[in-house]
């Protein structure tokens, strides 16, 4: 009887540990999908607003460590001389936070902006491919999102 109770206790402890780490894995992949969705939304906003009056020069996504990211609209008065990057609070379209168990581990960019009508893609700082890595703080498990200068978003 004592052996059975001990065995059941051990199995229960292992299951509880696995369920907890499995839950963090689900959160990690959910947040990765959320970032992919936000990047795609900014890209489609950049295309959808071309030719309308009073619209921004483009839409982009700004990343700030450890856990903030947002969609912004480039509000330059003259799009030809726009800085093509996030310039502060007035440009916020929608703001997001990573789940508290996660943080940005690697950010090789601060901004990516989609400029109509193509949309052209500008990554700040300038590079051909940018990488965003999100990580579970406790376990170190990570997920990667990449975006290139052609606007292709991948994992």
Image: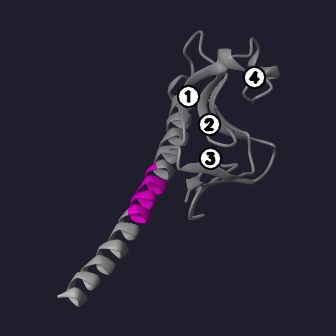
Report x, y in % for residue 4: 21, 86
Is residue 140 found inside the magenta-colored segment of the image?
Answer: no
Looking at the rendered image, the quarter that the N terminus falls into is bottom left
126 displayed left or right of 75: right
Would you call the spot at circle 2 few (<14 residues within 10 Å), some (14-19), or many (20 or more)?
Answer: some
Residue at numbered disc 3 = 151
Q: Nearer the viewer, residue 19 or 130?
A: 19
4 vs 2, front mark = 2
Q: Are marks 2 and 1 in contact (CB under 8 Å)?
A: yes
Q: Secondary structure at mark 1?
A: strand
- Upstream in sequence: badge 4 or badge 2: 2
Report x, y in % for residue 49: 53, 22
Q: Residue at x 40, y 62 (%)?
A: 20
Rounded to the nearest angstrom, the CA distance separating label 3 from label 2 is: 21 Å
Report x, y in % for residue 66: 67, 43
Residue at numbered disc 1 = 95
- Upstream in sequence: badge 3 or badge 1: 1
Q: Residue at x 40, y 68 (%)?
A: 17
Would you call the spot at circle 1 few (<14 residues within 10 Å), some (14-19), or many (20 or more)?
Answer: few
User: From which residue to which does the magenta span run?
Assistant: 20-30
Rounded to the nearest angstrom, the CA distance separating label 2 from label 1 is: 8 Å
Q: Nearer the viewer, residue 119 or 127?
A: 127
Q: Residue at x 57, y 19 (%)?
A: 51
Q: Secondary structure at mark 2?
A: strand
3 vs 1, front mark = 1
Q: Are marks 4 and 1 in contact (CB under 8 Å)?
A: no
């Amino acid at each position: 009887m004592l052996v059975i109770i001990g065995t059941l206790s051990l199995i229960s402890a292992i299951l509880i540990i696995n369920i907890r780490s499995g839950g963090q894995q689900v959160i990690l992949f959910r947040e990765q999908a959320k970032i992919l969705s936000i990047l795609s939304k900014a890209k489609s906003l950049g295309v959808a607003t071309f030719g309308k009056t009073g619209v921004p020069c483009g839409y982009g996504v700004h990343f700030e460590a450890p856990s903030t990211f947002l969609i912004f609209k480039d509000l330059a008065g003259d799009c030809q001389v726009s800085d093509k990057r996030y310039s502060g609070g007035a440009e916020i379209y929608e703001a997001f936070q990573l789940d508290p168990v996660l943080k940005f581990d690697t950010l090789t960019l601060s901004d990516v902006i989609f400029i109509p009508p193509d949309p052209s893609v500008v990554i700040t700082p300038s590079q051909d491919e940018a990488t965003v890595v999100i990580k579970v703080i406790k376990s170190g498990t990570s997920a990667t999102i990449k975006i290139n200068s052609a606007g292709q978003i991948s994992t």
